[in-house]
Amino acid sequence: MADGLFTQHLDVVVQDISFGAREDLDYALHLLSAARDGAVAPTVRIYRPQPTAAFGQRDVRLPGYAAARDRCRDAGYAPLVRRSGGRAALYDRGAVVIDHVEPHGDAIVGSQQRYQDFSGVIAAALGHAGVTTGIGELPGEYCAGEHSVFGTDGLHRAKLVGIAQRVVAGAWLISAVVSIEDTASLRTLITDVYRDLELDLDPGTIGAATDFVPALTPDAFLEHLVWAYGQRTDLTVR
């Protein structure tokens, strides 16, 4: 799939220590620039983030943004504005972040296919871990997206994965935040932030993989993710 997600070989880099909330977001853009310049081969970077409140650029223009930003800072979540689209996404070390970057002569070509491939490989990893998943936007979900991955037990559905993509001349970056573990306090914070921003939200769509497989951990999910990528292409894991 030349215009999709998977090349003949991928470097998988597991970043053991977060650089910091802002630094981790900036490093993804550094990788994108390096790929554009031919300095980075197709690479998947995986890490567990520091507590982060990643606001979308549209959020900053809302009347309630200052209150939402301050609420996050008071709760210990670094308020940042990301360059990719979407609405506010809050996450911490209970999540796994995936940045997949590749050089490409015409990076706009295949962008929709990349969304499908990326959501598919993450859904496969969660499925390998025992989580029943689906792909698509849930009514009232936070940071809504048509390629979100949700978990389900047949009665309840909750968003587990948000995906964003950034394209520049000569390269592309597609990223995901996968919620593995979360807490009642994080769910309450997300709900309050969306209330500050006056954005629609069904709190019942906020979830984590442990809602469906309680024993799953972020570190264990890394192994399932490497397995899922390995079913699709050749890997070097570092």
Image (cartoon, rainbow, N blue to C red):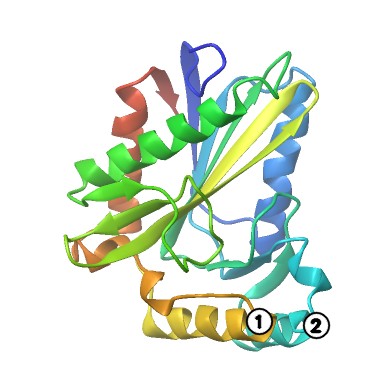
**Distance between mark 1 and mark 2 Cα atoms:** 9 Å
**Amino acid tagged 1:** Glu
- Please give left or right for residue 17 compared with residue 83 in the image: left
Q: Position of residue 95 (x, y in %)?
A: 44, 60
Examine the rendered structure and indicate whether residue 179 appears above or below residue 175. below
- Label 1 or label 2, whichever comes before in sequence order: 2
**Amino acid tagged 2:** Pro
Question: Which residue is painted at 73% across and 16% down in the image?
Answer: 106
Label tally: 2
The residue at which mark 1 appears reads as 198
Q: Are marks 1 and 2 in contact (CB under 8 Å)?
A: yes
Dot 1 surroundings within 10 Å: few (below 14), some, or many (20 or more)? Answer: few
Question: Which residue is painted at 76% across and 23% down in the image?
Answer: 36
Question: Which residue is painted at 28% across and 46% down in the image?
Answer: 126
Q: Report if residue 74 is visible in the image.
A: yes
Q: Position of residue 130 (x, y in %)?
A: 17, 49
Under tag 1, what secondary structure?
A: loop
Examine the rendered structure and indicate whether residue 30 appears above or below residue 204. above
Judging depth in this view, the residue of 101 and 117 nearest the camera is 117
Q: Position of residue 191 (x, y in %)?
A: 51, 82
- Please give left or right for residue 212 compared with residue 135 in the image: left
Q: Report if residue 179 is visible in the image.
A: no
The residue at which mark 2 appears reads as 63
Under tag 2, what secondary structure?
A: loop
Examine the rendered structure and indicate whether residue 64 appears above or below residue 138. below
